Amino acid sequence: MKPNTPFLVVIPARLASTRLPNKPLADIAGKPMVVRVAERALMSGASRVVIAVDDQSIFDACKTYGLDVMLTSKDHPTGTDRLSEVVSKLNLQDDEIVVNVQGDEPLIPSDLITEVANTLSQHPQASIATTALAIHDPAEINNPNVVKVVMNQSHQALYFSRSAIPFSRNPEQHQAQCYRHIGMYAYRASFLKKFSKLSPAPIEEAEALEQLRALWHGFAIQVLLTDEAPPPGVDTAEDLERVRQAFASLGKP
């Protein structure tokens, strides 16, 4: 898939990880995980891929592979704050599009990166674009670890929640379709310049969902519906082993 507008990919990568120490540098088929993520991002057609790191060891590892890397503050509370620093340092224009690719998703489909950038480009009224997938497993609907999103008829997000939304009061008569939010985001640089100055929202703190801050403050989020969920990222040693096996089966150099 080709992009319909130039866009930038930023990959935030923090060295600290509660469940998997030094996660960005974990070896996957002979290369650090963050390098594997960057390789996927480079296949998306992005005009530039920047790895935003908080530690010299990650910076040096990325430079070894000739990647575009930026050392950022260790004090950012969220990955979005780290993106905001990158936007500021690069002096991006307000209408430029920035896609956030998590540094622990070495199997992220490159086409999905392109699609979310294209979605934001095609909806100038939106400040953010993200992705969602129809839920077919009833167990996921009431699972608080599965974030749901409700949209309007134009596929703009109305609300995100860990609860079952929309709730079907009379499921025998009408069972509402629920959608699982997939945490891939494209942002306009203008939004990222404002994000760190926005006060946290009560609904954000209640649900522990950062994207609710944008809705609370009146920013539109366009939702791209996809047919297939991307492979899960790496949070644990077990996840890392699964990804290593996937790369081995693909015969990745």
Image (cartoon, grey):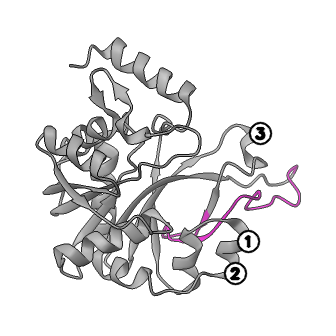
Where does residue 1 sit, x and y in percent of width and height?
21, 44
Q: Is residue 207 left or right of residue 185?
A: right
Residue under the image location 34 percent in, 74 percent down: 84
Q: Is residue 21 left or right of residue 38?
A: right
Residue under the image location 23 percent in, 40 percent down: 61
For mark 1, give the secondary structure: helix
CA–CA distance in space, label 3 to label 1: 22 Å
For mark 2, give the secondary structure: helix
Q: Nearer the viewer, mark 3 or mark 2?
A: 2
Circle 3: is it few (<14), some (14-19), or many (20+) Cα within 10 Å?
few
Labels 1 and 2 touching (C-beta < 8 A): yes
Where does residue 180 sit, x and y in percent of width and height?
60, 50
Labels 3 and 2 touching (C-beta < 8 A): no
Residue pointed to by mark 1:
206
- Image position of 189 with respect to 218: above or below: above
Residue 208 occupies quadrant = bottom right
- Image position of 14 with respect to 37: above or below: below
Residue under the image location 39 percent in, 85 percent down: 194
Residue pointed to by mark 2:
202
Magenta stretch? 150-172
- Image position of 183 with respect to 190: above or below: above
Residue pointed to by mark 3:
139
CA–CA distance in space, label 3 to label 2: 28 Å
Residue under the image location 69 percent in, 76 percent down: 203
Q: Which amino acid type is marked by label 1?
A: Ala
For mark 3, give the secondary structure: helix
Magenta region includes residue 141: no
